[in-house]
Image (cartoon, rainbow, N blue to C red):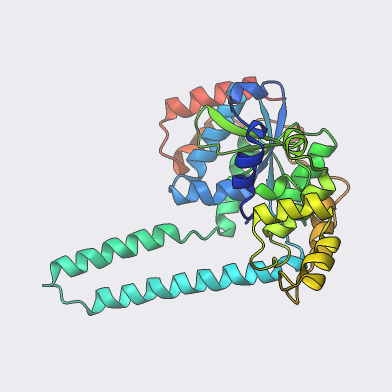
Amino acid sequence: MGIKDLNKFIKTFSPKGIKQVPISHYTGKTLAVDTSIFMYKFKYSNKLIDSFFQQYYHFKKEGVELIYVFDGKPPEEKEYVLNTRKNAREKQVNKIEEIKKKIDQTDDNNFDEKKKLKKQLAEMERRYINITQEDIDNVKSLFDKIGAKYIHQESEADPICCDMFKKNIVQGCISNDMDFLPTGAGILIRNYNLGNMVDEYNLNVILEETGMDLNKFIDFCILCGCDYTCKIPRLGFITAFKSLQQFNNIETIIEELCVKQEKFKLPQHFNYKVARKLLKDGGKIIETYEIHNNTFTKEETTDIVKFILDKTKYSEIQIINRLKIIFNNIK
């Protein structure tokens, strides 16, 4: 997920493109949230609803509005990547089943071995995160009860988030996915861990410091390796950057380095034109977004408290205190 080595490239060639800022830096602004990133992150910690409630409260306390964007159907061009991930998940499930069998077959008297296997199983199951429809419905129910705005369209979240940034509906995008930068998120906010500080990536600064325009930057990201096509083997991010400085675009790099000089072998399925189009305009962008809770009518507080009490480890007083902050800052 993302652009291979892009973070390393930015830290090397555009250190001013990244800065640490407090959440309060965005007071008065609206930010888009790549919800799926946090679905996995929060479920991994076994605090799915707890963490979304805390995240929303955290930003509202600082006067920041959030619009959560759920993933819809991915483009067909991403099928290869998705199949690779699916195969990896299946292998993980098979390993879990193998360990379960070993536990069953291990004699109860072999206490140390059985304990070791159970510890191994617990760790593997914790790492195997599967987001269910029930998880999604519970998160949406939370959002409906606390007035958090969200979008769930027939598209992946990143092109919608980036399109909203281009239209100034939002002034930044929260995600750990580096795809957001070539897709046009001028401000990418990464590494939110329920703390007060985040890393802000500024696309304009990155382009200025590296001497690239957006078109060249998109080509660079494709050469590094993205979700929409394979990459040219052995062509690393430094070589890709230097080659673009010399040849300006992928077409000329292919002609000069793959055909004439034969320095690199061009893969059969290097669909850079498709990748370029998807990164530029996100494929099929829906012109209007249905933003749920754009107008919000609060339920009875007791019903909201009961829902959160049932699904989190917060005490009633903790929930009520957070709700006061949230509802005092509803836009």
Pick whichever, 264 or 53, lies toward us: 264
Q: Does 312 sit above or below residue 320?
A: below
Give me the residue at 58% from left, 70% from top: 86
Residue at point 83% right, 55% down?
247
Instruction: Please report the residue visible at 76 percent of the width from the left and 32 percent of the height from the top.
Output: 295
Q: In this view, does 213 lie to the left or right of 24?
A: right
Res 63 seen here:
no
- Image quadrant where one finds the C terminus: top right
In the image, taking residue 57 as reference, residue 27 lies left or right, namely: right
Quadrant, the N terminus? bottom right
Up/down of 281 relative to 30, above or below = below
Closer to the camera, 312 or 95?
95
Query: Residue 70 in the image: x percent, y percent?
Result: 68, 50
| Number of marks in picture | 0
- Residue 275: image quadrant is bottom right
Residue 23 visible? The answer is yes
Residue 265: which quarter of the image? bottom right
Q: Nearer the viewer, residue 255 or 272?
A: 255
